[in-house]
Image (cartoon, rainbow, N blue to C red):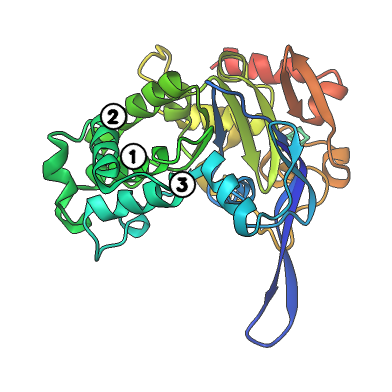
Amino acid sequence: EAVDVTKHFAVTSGVGSTATVRAVEDVTLRLHPGRVTAVVGESGSGKTTLARLLARFYEPTEGAIRLEGRLVGRPRGGEELAYRKAVQLIFQDPFGSLNPLHRVRHNIDRAIRLHHRGLSRAERLARARELLERVSLTPADDYLRKFPHELSGGQRQRVVIARALAVEPRVLLGDEPISMLDVSIRLEMLNLLDRLRREDGLALLYITHDIASARYLCDDIVVMYAGRVVESGPKEAVISNPRHPYTKLLIESSPDPHRDVALDRDDVFGSAEELGEPPSLIDPPSGCRFHPRCPFAMERCRTTRPPRAEVGPGHGADCWLHEAGRGDELASASMTR
Ligand code: SF4
């Protein structure tokens, strides 16, 4: 659980001046055993920083991380080992996650040895075989002998997942785990993650820029924009009834084979050129950070940060439209196209 977590980074320019990157601000989210929570946003939204905060690679500037109700400081020594055992992070690039000099067996065995001391060599080998079978790399003995460069991207990511499972984690954080894989195997990987979270009761955080894959895999969605959460709630509610203009933009920008009406996002959001780029996190827009791109922006959007409006059970959106009684404009703009 992240509670009001903020992460700022100090950066120094080439000429020696310093600035602050406001990567994540006031983010609260809770993961649940056996459920998948997707964090969705474009690059620069702060989602990878959030994953690293939850993995405790970074110390929050403000706010707290809790694991099963207990406050977690920056883990060190034995504490770090215990935290790593509970919370595993899968990176986007499976090749960068595996030691290229070692065979798959060694890559996995290292995790087994670190976290299950006292197992014999034969027991560790049996465990490594079992893990590869769980991620559908069979016959396992063939894969145990291979080096990472002998595997496809999808096979490498399966090895990374098997290694993560070696420590029997309770939380799995996937930072764009399928985005570097061939399109043809992405669905298989999503199905694998789905099966594993069901079998092990894992709390799974799925970070993605692709709302279609989030829609496929997750139970809950958290939408981030420019370092802040702008909408969150159960998947069906957020997808079928987005209550923040940015969520609506993400959904309409995503191909949907089930949508029988051709949507033209230019109707509401203007052309892609008019949308512009996501804002700089060094000098983000005042008030609502989405206001320079938002066709509904009002005066107060430019000056004052919107509060979270509860728009349904467990469903909230940080947008002034709701306070102003104009939330239905968003819904009707969606229905008329
Ligand atoms: Fe648009 Fe204002 Fe809502 Fe921000 S708060 S999304 S600018 S209407």
Seen from the viewer's position, the closer of residues 213 and 332 is 213
Q: Which sits earlier in the primary sequence, circle 1 or circle 2? A: 2
The image shows residue 62 at horizontal and vertical percentages of 81, 52
| Front: mark 3 or 1 | 3
Whether pointer 1 and pointer 2 mark residues with C-beta atoms closer than 8 Å, the reply is yes
Q: Amino acid at mark 1?
A: Ala
Q: CA distance from mark 1 to mark 2?
A: 7 Å
Query: Which quarter shows the N terminus?
Result: top right
The image shows residue 253 at horizontal and vertical percentages of 48, 32
Q: Which residue is mark 2?
A: 134
The image shows residue 312 at horizontal and vertical percentages of 74, 12
Q: Which residue is mark 1?
A: 162
Q: Which residue is mark 3?
A: 115
Based on the displayed image, in which of its 4 quarters is residue 216 positioned?
top left
Which secondary structure lies at badge 3? helix
Which secondary structure lies at badge 1? helix
Dot 3 crowding, Cα within 10 Å, few <14, some 14–19, many 20+: some
Q: CA distance from mark 3 to mark 1?
A: 14 Å
- Residue 1 makes an appearance in the image: yes
Q: Amino acid at mark 2?
A: Arg
